[in-house]
Image: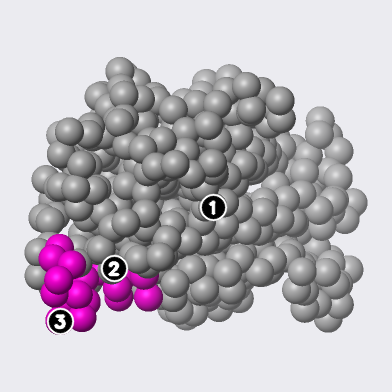
Amino acid sequence: MQKKSAENKSSEKLVSIDGYSLTLDQIEAVARNHVNAELASNARIQVQDCANTILDIANSEHPVYGVNTGFGIFASQRIAPEETVRLSRNLILSHLVGVGAPFEKDIVRAAILIRANTFAHGNSGVRPQLIDTLLDMLRYDVTPYIPSRGSLGASGDLAPLAHLASVISAPLEDDQEDYSGQAWFRDQLMSGAEAMAAANLARIMLGPKEGLAITNGATFSTATLALACIDAERVLRCAEIAAALSLEALLGVSGAFDPRLHDARPHPGQIMVASRIRELTNESDLLDADDRVHDAYSLRCIPQILGPVWDILSFVKMVVTTEVNAATDNPLLFDEQAISGGNFHGEPIGLAADYLKIALSKVGSLSERRIFRLTAEHTNAGLPPMLVAHKEKAGILSGLMMLQYTAASLTLENQALAMPDTLHSIPTSAGQEDINPNATTAVHHLSELMDNLWKIVAIELIVAAQALDLRLLAMPQANSGVGTSAAYKYVRQHLPFREVDSPYSEDIEALSEILRAGDLTREVESALGGL
């Protein structure tokens, strides 16, 4: 094990995994902030005891799937004790079928941590050495290159996990070649063997069941969903801020956010969103400045639409937190008994990803409708058409007209991406695996959808800031709310008011990246004393 590294995080930030208590925040800390992790001492004992049991089973006459039998349709084929190591190595090699662009590094790092935590549960039969090797890869910045396509999320993410295993799996003496896949050592891509050597880490010869254990479980799907939950919370905060800015720019009616109204329909998310809109717009002179009785749904029903999204996100976070602290390979060992089942099946993750896709797609649809209202003269409460800076030049100037086109395009794409992927199944392994969850595709589509959503929210903030500029020019004595003022100032720090027609592509991309970093939310929370 490598001892050096000035880059290693302090022991104070160490994440201790025991198979039962890993959190989403800890996953992000390891995946994105390079915090280190270690196997808890109590878990190490349980893991070693289970590994000893596997060795006994491998040398017994009693057939146990994947330990001394073949895999899938070859489950009835007995494997001699001296061939169990070859069985693990062959499993890895035969499952290297992934294609396409690689998973993002943060997802790979999250998957490595989650797989190690699964083993720490103490039911998989792997040696502590395998867990230590996985955690050392995180510690010394070895990130396998994992093709992102080729998994159904059914018997787990078989191909992606095999590509992970190829980096750490040592060849056998009679292997004709040492295939080790690819991996980044820090930021340099090389063969897996070279990356491990560069980090001074030893590859290991996978023992009985270890090849099966490391490839079983919907780990990459789970890692993607875990990080998506964290990002979804952040994009929802930004969507609320954008909604509040638009509400003010359109002289919205505050009664729709009266706490009595929401207490009468006490969905937790709805109550929470209404409260935050009140806080964001507190001290605003723009609300109720018109004589409307109530607004269109895209303004009046912000709590009723965004609130359920928060409720669904809460459910999805519960599902993924349960999954990352579960034993998900097959078979599992309990005392001396190996029990074969289906904990590797990715249905919980696939369905949760589908739920979240549908909910987040609605967030984009809501935002786009407000962008439309802000730019259309007949719906924007007296603002110039397309928010041109000089109304007399409308026609010569197109203003922000085309931003709504982009928002509409991204919204339509998200509506397609939100279609449930878990509805679709194709049998595999000669029908032994006759119903598959398609979980990996669901999380891929979720990631694409969220990338679009960040851009839609960025567009609304650009449009709402322009609208607020024009509104305050027409109403110079008025003030916006405490939270919305902070949000407006933050947007203007990065993007100027546009008096003439200008290209917006770079503005959209730049602001969406800024939003992902969380700075806007922090600025607003600071102004409000913490939302």
Q: Identify the image quadrant of the N terminus.
A: top left
The residue beneath circle 2 is: 385
Instruction: Measure the C-alpha gap from mark 3 to mark 2.
Output: 12 Å
Picture coordinates of residue 20 (x, y %)? 62, 28
Name the one closer to the observer, 249 or 492. Answer: 249
The residue beneath circle 1 is: 296
Left or right: 23 in relation to 84: left
Instruction: Measure the C-alpha gap from mark 3 to mark 1.
Output: 30 Å
Kind of residue at badge 1 = Ala
**Residue 66 covered by magenta stretch:** no
The quarter holding residue 216 reads bottom right
Residue at (17%, 33%) from the top-left corner? 477
Is residue 95 visible in the rendered structure shown here?
yes
Kind of residue at badge 3 = Ile
Query: Do the residues bearing badges 3 and 2 touch, measured as CB atoms within 8 Å?
Result: no
Residue at (19%, 75%) from the top-left corner? 394
Residue at (39%, 42%) from the top-left corner? 290
Q: Residues within 10 Å of mark 1 (few under 14, many from 20)?
A: few
Left or right: 448 in relation to 345: left
Picture coordinates of residue 350 (x, y %)? 68, 58
The residue beneath circle 3 is: 396
Name the one closer to the observer, 369 or 17. Answer: 369
What range is drawn magenta here? Answer: 389-405
Kind of residue at badge 2 = Pro
Left or right: 447 in relation to 333: left
The quarter holding residue 6 reads top left
Q: Identify the image quadrant of the C terminus.
A: top left
Label 1: state its secondary structure. Answer: loop
Picture coordinates of residue 412 (x, y %)? 52, 73
**What colour scheme does the image use?**
one colour
